[in-house]
Image (cartoon, rainbow, N blue to C red):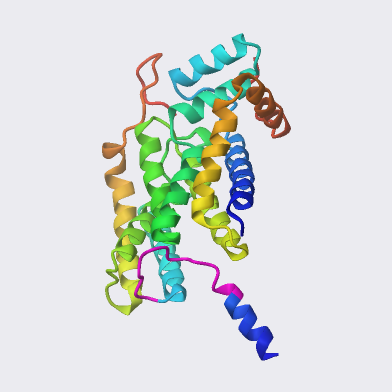
């Protein structure tokens, strides 16, 4: 039986999840911090009255919403902090919540200024 | 795992990943930018399929799931799973700079990161995925563009995403 347990753990160690970097917090804490970042960004975006889903032709809409660009930005920026090995207090959970809130604020107030919608070439109006 | 066998398996996995994600998010349906339309019309003039041509033009002109898979493999090699997520974030920014909503690119990077993580348990390494992705792109764009566009058009028809002409 111990052979089976040892063999299972050894087999699981094949899954290399951190590449060439040394991440200080454990994989479980990192997963928890990612979940906190996603939830904080979505909740903050909903508080700021962003719509939950983008506008109606779903696959071609340039609208920002709570579910599409906000969590991607939050977990992307949190990953940069993680690989730079800067996790603030409480195993990165506080940092994840701060990044989630800031990314929701960015999406609400600055996103259209940084990434403007492309112009429709027919009449120069914003594309929908 | 043997490197050659691993690269072949990784190429098949990458091909399925980016073709399915790109087709689902409607790349064969319409050309997003002018360059994609020119490539599509040129391929269909040479006897190819117009939907496959739009597909090839779109993955040429803006970073979609193909570029997402390649960048996620490189990010996974260097930085692990956070690297794959950083790749998704950068692919999203590149998409928005290319006047593309960016659904296909970010989804493709995240699914590629998941596939690399799962298949690392059977001994496939991210290096094999980088090599496999280059081979997968070569089969779509490089060897025979006309026949590849016909295959892509059939897949688009299966997904109900064919360009209605």
Left or right position of A56 against A93: right
Of residue B129 and residue A80, the one placed in the foreground of this image is B129
In the picture, the quarter occupied by the N terminus of chain B is bottom right
Q: Position of residue B74 (x, y in %)?
A: 43, 50
Left or right position of B73 against B50: left
Residue displayed at 62% across by 47% down: B13
Above or below, comparing residue A15 to residue B141 in the picture:
below
Of residue A47 and residue B13, the one placed in the foreground of this image is B13
Q: Position of residue A88 (x, y in %)?
A: 27, 73
Numbered circles on residues, count:
0
Asked if residue A100 shows in the view, the reply is no
Q: Position of residue A49 (x, y in %)?
A: 39, 51
Magenta-colored stretch includes residue A23: yes
Q: What residue occupies the far top of the structure in this picture?
A: B45
Residue displayed at 59% across by 41% down: B21
Above or below, comparing residue B86 to residue A30 in the picture:
above
Residue displayed at 49% across by 21% down: B36
Magenta-colored stretch includes residue A36: no
In the picture, the quarter occupied by the C terminus of chain B is top right
Asked if residue A114 shows in the view, the reply is yes
Left or right position of B50 against A36: right
Q: Which residues are magenta?
A: A11-25
Residue displayed at 61% across by 10% down: B46
Above or below, comparing residue A74 to residue B41 in the picture:
below
């Amino acid at each position: 039986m111990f052979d089976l347990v040892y063999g299972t753990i050894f087999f699981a160690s094949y899954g290399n999840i951190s590449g060439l970097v040394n991440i200080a917090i454990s994989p479980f804490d990192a997963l928890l911090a990612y979940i906190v970042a996603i939830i904080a960004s979505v909740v903050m975006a909903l508080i700021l009255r962003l719509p939950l889903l983008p506008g109606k032709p779903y696959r071609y809409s340039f609208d920002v919403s709570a579910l599409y660009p906000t969590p991607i930005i939050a977990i992307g920026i949190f990953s940069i902090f993680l690989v730079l090995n800067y996790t603030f207090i409480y195993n990165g959970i506080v940092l994840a919540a701060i990044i989630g809130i800031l990314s929701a604020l960015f999406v609400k107030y600055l996103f259209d200024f940084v990434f403007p919608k492309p112009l429709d070439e027919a009449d120069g109006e914003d594309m929908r | 795992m043997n490197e050659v066998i691993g690269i072949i398996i990784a190429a098949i996995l990458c091909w399925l990943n980016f073709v399915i994600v790109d087709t689902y998010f409607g790349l064969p349906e319409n050309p997003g930018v002018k360059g994609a339309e020119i490539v599509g019309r040129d391929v269909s003039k040479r006897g190819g399929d117009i939907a496959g041509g739009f597909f090839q033009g779109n993955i040429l002109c803006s970073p979609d799931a193909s570029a997402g898979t390649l960048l996620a493999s490189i990010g996974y090699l260097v930085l692990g799973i956070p690297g794959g997520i950083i790749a998704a974030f950068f692919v999203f920014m590149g998409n928005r700079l290319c006047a593309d909503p960016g659904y296909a690119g970010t989804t493709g990077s995240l699914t590629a990161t998941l596939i690399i993580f799962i298949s690392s348990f059977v001994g496939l390494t991210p290096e094999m995925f980088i090599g496999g992705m280059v081979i997968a792109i070569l089969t779509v764009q490089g060897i025979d563009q006309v026949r590849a566009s016909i295959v892509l058009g059939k897949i688009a028809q299966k997904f109900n995403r064919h360009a209605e002409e």
